[in-house]
Image (spheres, rainbow, N blue to C red):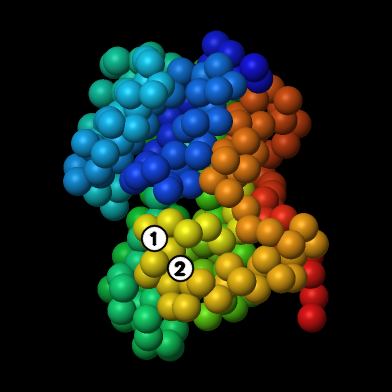
């Protein structure tokens, strides 16, 4: 078990279809103590899921665009669990109209909202975790992104722009937190049928294309992304930082 004795914080679990839930399951199977965060309206569902993980706990993390909400969440987790060894950032949001309309019609407020929640929250959480001295030596941070940051994906729109900013932030953060001996990486997961994915127009057709054209001719699962996350949390990846690793059955390497 590659995470035995480690404590990992999985931020952004919503339900059993969440990619973050796949990460929680994999971390637990690999021996980690699992701590989850979710929104207020998801806490009952997440607590029910955690019944299959004795010792795992869930906490409400409010609006991550408000520093005080992040402080409240992290302070409670440190109080209850002490220092941790890993953080998964699986938090993103964009207004529905900014996904359904052409990108050119993205509102100023909608653009700022997507960037704040989906990207800047990673910067804020990373900084605050370090300032609160809640990271153990060699701690690893992981954030989820998607291929829509690199290429135009119909319907991904402002979220693609936010994910591009997220990926750049990961690289800049790697330099800053490397001074403390911490690592940070991103996982660019292939498309997965989650609650959030329902907001993307014609999402089903994207799954069909990936299955048809990816080298492995299949779609990725939350378990596979979770396993990759566990690896990045582990000491086996101790020389990897600032990277965006594609877990997409090879789809991102295929041309026309």
**Could you say where residue 39 lies in the image, as x and y percent from the top left?**
25, 44
**Is the residue 225 above or below the residue 112 in the image?**
above
Label 1 secondary element? helix
Nearer the camera: disc 1 or disc 2: 1
Disc tally is 2
Observer able to see residue 168: no
Residue depicted at x 50% and y 23% = 28
Q: Quadrant of residue 67?
A: top left
**Could you say where residue 73 lies in the image, as x and y percent from the top left?**
27, 32
Q: Are the residues flagged by discs 1 and 2 in contact, CB closer than 8 Å?
A: no
Q: Quadrant of residue 198?
A: bottom left
Task: Tell me if 121 is positioned left or right of 189 in this view.
Answer: left
Residue depicted at x 42% and y 87% = 102
Residue depicted at x 72% and y 55% = 249
**Could you say where residue 124 lies in the image, as x and y percent from the top left?**
39, 44
**Is the residue 175 above or below the residue 47 in the image?**
below
Residue depicted at x 58% and y 49% = 221
Task: Tell me if 47 is positioned left or right of 145 in this view.
Answer: left
| Disc 1 crowd, CA 10 A, few/some/many (<14, 14-19, 20+) | some
Label 2 secondary element? helix
* Disc 1/disc 2 C-alpha distance (Å): 11 Å
| Pointer 2 residue | 159
Task: Tell me if 50 is positioned left or right of 140 in this view.
Answer: left
Residue 36 circle label: none
**Is the residue 87 above or below the residue 78 in the image?**
below
Observer able to see residue 37: yes
The residue nearer to you, when weighing 49 against 153, is 49
**Nearer the N terminus, badge 1 or badge 2?**
2
| Pointer 1 residue | 196
Task: Tell me if 161 is positioned left or right of 105 in this view.
Answer: right
The residue nearer to you, when weighing 33 against 132, is 33
Going by the picture, which residue comes out furthest to the top?
A: 5
């Amino acid at each position: 078990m590659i995470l035995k004795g480690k404590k990992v914080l999985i931020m952004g679990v919503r339900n059993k279809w969440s990619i973050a839930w796949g990460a929680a399951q994999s971390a637990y199977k690999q021996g980690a103590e699992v701590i989850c965060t979710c929104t207020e309206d998801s806490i009952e569902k997440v607590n029910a899921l955690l019944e299959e993980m004795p010792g795992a706990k869930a906490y409400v993390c409010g609006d991550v665009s408000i520093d005080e909400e992040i402080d409240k969440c992290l302070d409670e987790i440190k109080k209850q669990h002490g220092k941790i060894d890993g953080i998964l950032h699986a938090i993103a949001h964009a207004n529905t109209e900014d996904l359904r309309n052409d990108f050119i019609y993205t509102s100023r407020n909608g653009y700022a909202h997507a960037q704040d929640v989906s990207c800047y929250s990673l910067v804020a959480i990373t900084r605050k975790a370090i300032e609160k001295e809640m990271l153990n030596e060699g701690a690893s941070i992981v954030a989820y992104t998607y291929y829509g940051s690199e290429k135009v994906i119909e319907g991904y729109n402002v979220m693609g722009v936010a994910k591009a900013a997220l990926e750049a932030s990961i690289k800049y953060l790697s330099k800053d937190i490397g001074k403390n001996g911490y690592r940070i990486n991103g996982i660019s997961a292939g498309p997965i049928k989650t609650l959030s994915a329902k907001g993307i127009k014609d999402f089903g057709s994207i799954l069909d294309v990936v299955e048809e054209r990816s080298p492995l001719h299949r779609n990725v699962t939350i378990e596979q992304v979770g396993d990759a996350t566990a690896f990045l949390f582990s000491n086996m990846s101790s020389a990897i930082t600032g990277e965006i690793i594609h877990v997409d059955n090879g789809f991102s390497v295929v041309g026309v």
